[in-house]
Image (tube, coloured by chain):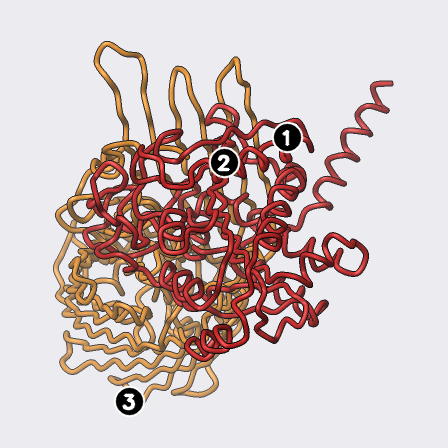
Amino acid sequence: MKAQNTLLIVLTLLLSAAAYPQGINGAYHSYLELEADIFALQHKYPDIVKVFDIGDSLEKRNLYAIKISDNVLVEEDEPEVLFLGCHHAREWISVEVPFLMGKYLAEHYASDPAVRRFVDQSEIWIIPLVNPDGLEYTLHGYRLWRKNRRDNGGGDYGVDLNRNYGYKWGIDDLGSSPNPASEVYRGSTPFSEPETRAVRDLYLKKNFQALISFHSYSQVILYPWGYTKQPPDGVMTLKEIAAEMSARIQAVNGRLYEYGQSGDALYLTNGDVTDWAFAISGIPAYTIELTPIDWASGGFFNRQEDIDPIFEENLPAMAYLIDLAIRDYRPLGPAVFDLKRRLFKKD
Amino acid sequence: MKRERAGKVFCLLFGFLALLPSSVSAQLILGQYQAEAPLRTWNSFPYTAAAALGRGGTAFALASDASAAVSNPALLAGLPKFQFHMNGSYQAAELFKYGLVNTGVLRSDGNIGLSLAGLDFAGLAFRLEGWSFALNVSQAELFDRPEAAYEETYSNSTYTYLLRFTQTGWLRTFNFSVGHRLGPRLSLGIGLNYVLGRLDRETLERETPVGYTLLDTKSQDFSGYYIQGGLLFEISDAFKTAAVVRAPYALKAKNSSTVRYTYTPPYNTDIGLTTSSKDTADQPLILGLGLSGRVLPELTLSVDATYFAWSKYALDYFGERQTREFEDIVRIGVGAEYGTTTRIFGANARIPFRIGFVYDPQPMTDPRSAYACFTFGNGIYWHRLRLDMGALLGRESGSGNRLAVKRFAVSLGFSL
C-alpha cells in the first residue's frame, strides 16, 4: 500500500511537471510567451482574431491589443468591449484571465452559438499585458514589483500605471503619491507613461461600451468613483451590473466576489483607468480584483492549477458585460461612423 | 491589492559587508542589472597572478610563473624545468546597481562595497623531452554581491519585517596546456580548458511572528570547455612578441527557479512554483597581442592588447534570449619591471619591482564605461623559492558612480 501511494505521488508530480510549460514562471506567461501565444491564436483563427501593436513600453517591448470579431479586419458599427490585464506587474493572474477569454472566444466561435453571437455582433478588444516591463522584472528581479520601469533617478524606479490616467489625476495624495519611491507614484504628469498613452490612444479611437480592468487580489468587483467616496451619477446601474456579475461568478465555483464603489469599498485611488473611462464615456467600467481574498490566502500568488478555474468563474461575468453592450448599443449610423473612422484613420 | 509598505524603499541596511573606500575589481555597470555579471570586470581573461598583475596585467609575451599557461601556453617553453605555483588574492569591489539594490526596491546612499579573499590559482608546469606541460586550476570569475537587507521592527511589538537579497557564485577553469619550441625563436602552445561554476541568488521576504514568507531562489550550474592557443616569437634576445586566441564557446547552464509563498498558521498557505531549464551563454572570441622588451639589463617593458568580441555575446535564460546590448572592446595593459639583486642569508636573491597601467573598457553600450587602473608589485626570488606580490587600484568612469576597485595578490612558487 505504501509503495502504491509513493508511486502515485511520484506519478502525480511527474504529470504535474509535464502539464505546465517550463518557462521561468511555469504556466503563467512571460512577455515573450504571451507574444508567441497571441500570434499563434491569430494564425490559427485569422478570420476572427487580429493582433495590433498599439505602442511600445519604456523598455521597447510591444504593447499588444487583440481584436476578436467577425470581419476582424474591418471596422464595423458594432459595440466594442475592452478587457485589460496587468497594469500591476506582480498580478500575474490578471494577464491570464483576459488572455484566456480571447482564446476561449476564438476556440468556441465555431461550436458555441452564444460565443458566435458575441463575436459576430460586437468587437471584443483585449490588452492582456499593459505593463510588460514590470512583468519581466517580477520574473528576473523582484516578484512583488508593482509599477512600470520608469527610471525616476537616485535608485527609484516605476510609475503606478493605474494612477497615471488623466481623470482627477493627482487630485490628492491619498489616492496616489507624488513620491517616485512610492508604490502608488502617479508619474510626473497625466499619461506620462507610454503604456497608459497606448491604452488611451486605442480607447479614443474606438467606441467602447464597457470595460473591465483585471487585477489581483481581494476578490471584489469595483466601479467608479475611485477618487472619492461620493457616488457618481448612475451608480445604481453600475451597482446592478456588478451584482449580476458577482452572482454569475459565484454560480461557477461558489466563490463570492463582493462589489462596491471603489473609493468607498476598498480605498481611494485617483488616476485609474476605470474612473477615466467612465468619466469620458459614461460606460460601465469595472475593476475586478481576482481571487484570493486576502494576503493570508495567497495575495498575489495563485497556484498554477487555479488559473483555469479562476478564468472559468470570471467568464460569465465577461460574457454578461458583452451581452449588455450588444443589447444596449445604439448604432452610430453610417454618417457618424464613417466620420469617426476617418478621424481616427490609423489603427 | 496590497498597500505599499511605507518606508520600505528608503532604508538600506547591510548584513555583513562594510562599505569600502575603494575596492579591487571594478563593478560592471549594470545597464540592466544582469545577474550573470562577474564581480570583477567582464574582461576576466586571462587570469593574472601577482607578478603579471603588478606589471599592468601584461601576460602574453612575458612569463613569470606557471600561470603563464592560462594566458599564453607558448610561454611554457621558457619556464624552469619544474615549477609549482599558488596565488591568493584579496579583492574588493564597489557596486551601485545590482539585484534589488538601486533598481527600485532597495536604495542606497552611495556605492556599496564587497570584499573577498581566497586562493585563486594553483598549478604546476614542467618540461619533458622538449615539450612543456601545465596543469592548473584558476578562479575565472566571481558572481558574489554584497548582501542587502531591510528590516523593520517596532517598539512594544514582536513584529518584524525582513527583506534580504543575497547572491554568490564562482566560475573556475581547469586547464591543461602543452607548449613546444618549433625553432630557436618560435614557440607554440595550446590549452584545453574546462569551466565549472555555480550561481545562487535568493530573495527572502518575511514577516514574523505572524505573516507571510516569500522565498525566491534562482540557481545555475555552469559548465563548458574552450580551447586557447598562443604563439611566441622572439624577435631578438631582448624582444618578444606574442599572439593569443581564445576560441568562442558556449557556457552551458542548468537553471532552476523556486518561488514559494507561505503564510503562518492557522492559514497554512503554501504556494510554490518550481521550474528548470537548460540554457547557454555564448562567450566571445578573444584575441590578444603582446610585446615585451628588455630595454636595459635590469628593465623590461611590456604591453598587451586584448580584443573581446562582446557584440557576439548571447544569453538564453529559461529558453528566452536576454537583451544584452554589448559592443566589442579592446583592453590595453602596459607594464615595467625593474630587477635588482641582493643577498639574503648568504645567497643571491633577485628583487623585481613592477608598475603598470590598465585601461579596461566595459562592453555595455549604455552607459559606456571603462576602468583606469594603476598596478604595482614586487617579488623575492631566492634559491628555488619565489614570492611575488601585486596590487591593482582603479576607478571607473562613465556610469556616474565612479566605482573603485582593488586587488592584492600574493604568489608563492617553487621551481627546479
Q: Label 2: which residue?
A: A221
Image location (x, y in percent) of residue B16: 26, 33
Question: Residue at (43%, 55%) from the top-left corner?
Answer: A131
Foreground tag (1 vs 3): 1
B81 or A294: which is nearer to us?
A294
Callouts 3 and 2 close, C-beta under 8 Å:
no
Q: In the rendered structure, which amino acid carries the disc numbered 3? A: Ser
Please tell me which residue is depicted at 71% across the width and 57% down the height of the picture.
A117
Give residue B236's mark.
3
Residues tagged by mark 1 and mark 3 found on one chain of the structure: no
| Secondary element type, mark 3 | loop
Element at badge 1? helix
- Of residues A95 and B386, the one drawn nearer to the viewer in this rendering: A95
Which image quarter: residue B116? top left
Q: Position of residue A185 (x, y in %)?
A: 26, 46
- Chain of the residue under label 2: A
Is A169 displayed left or right of A14 in the figure?
A: left
Q: Is residue B15 above or below residue A186?
A: above
Q: Are the residues flagged by discs 1 and 2 from a single subunit? A: yes
Spatial CA distance of label 1 from label 3 is 89 Å
- Give the side of residue B168 with respect to residue A128, left or right: left
User: Which chain is painted in red?
Assistant: A
The quadrant of the picture occupied by the N terminus of chain B is top left
User: Taking B359 as reference, is A295 above or below it?
Assistant: above
Furthest-top residue in this view: B156
Q: Give whichever of discs 1 and 2 has the lower sequence position.
A: 2
Residue named by callout 1: A250
Identity of the amino acid at label 2?
Ile
From the rendered image, report the letter of the chain displayed in orange: B
